[in-house]
Amino acid sequence: MKKFQFELEDILSVRKFQQEQAESELAKSLAVEQEIQRALDALAEYQTSIQKQMRGNTSFYDIVNATQFSGFVRNKSEMLMRRMAEAKVVSDEKRKIVKAAMQKTETLENLKKSQQKEYKIEVQKDDDNEIDDIVTSRQ
C-alpha cells in the first residue's frame, strides 16, 4: 500500500510560511506600540516628579522652567499619541492579515485531515478485503 500523500502539501507549506511571516510582522507592530506606551509612561512619570518638586517652590525661575517643561511634555505627549494612533492602525491591519492567513492555513489543514481519514478508511477496507481473500482461499 502506498503512503498517504497530500496533494496540496506544497501550498500548505507556503501558507504556513505566510502565516508565520504575518505573525512576525504583527509582533513587530505590537512592539512599536509598546515602545511608544513606555515613552508616554516615562514622560508622565517625569512630569509627576517635577510637579511634586515644585510644590511650595516660590522661585520665579523654577516656576517658569516648570511651566515650560509642562508645555514640552504636552507637545511631546501629543506627538506620541499621534504615533500611537498610527501604530494601532498598522497593528489592526496586521491582525487582519494574520487572521486571513490563519483561515487559509486552517482550511488546508482541515482538508488534509479529512483526506487522511479517508485514506485510513480505505487502507482498513483494503486490509479487511485482503484478510477475507486469505481466509476464503484457505477454505
Image (cartoon, rainbow, N blue to C red):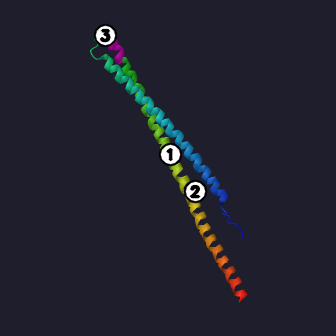
**Is residue 60 placed above or below 39 in the rendered structure?**
above
Q: Are marks 3 and 1 in contact (CB under 8 Å)?
A: no
Residue 15 falls within the magenta-colored stretch: no
Q: Name the residue under label 2.
A: 105
**Is residue 32 placed above or below 129 in the rendered structure?**
above
Element type at marker 3?
A: helix
Q: What segment is highlighted magenta in the picture?
A: 60-67
Element type at marker 2?
A: helix
**Quadrant position of residue 11:** bottom right
Q: Name the residue under label 1.
A: 93
Q: What residue type is labelled 1?
A: Glu
Q: Are marks 3 and 2 in contact (CB under 8 Å)?
A: no
- Label 1 Cα neighbours within 10 Å, binned few <14 / some 14-19 / many ≥20: some
**Quadrant position of residue 25:** top right
Name the one closer to the observer, 60 or 41: 41
Q: Is the magenta stretch mostly helix, strand or loop?
A: helix
Rendered image: mark on residue 60: 3
Name the one closer to the observer, 32 or 124: 124
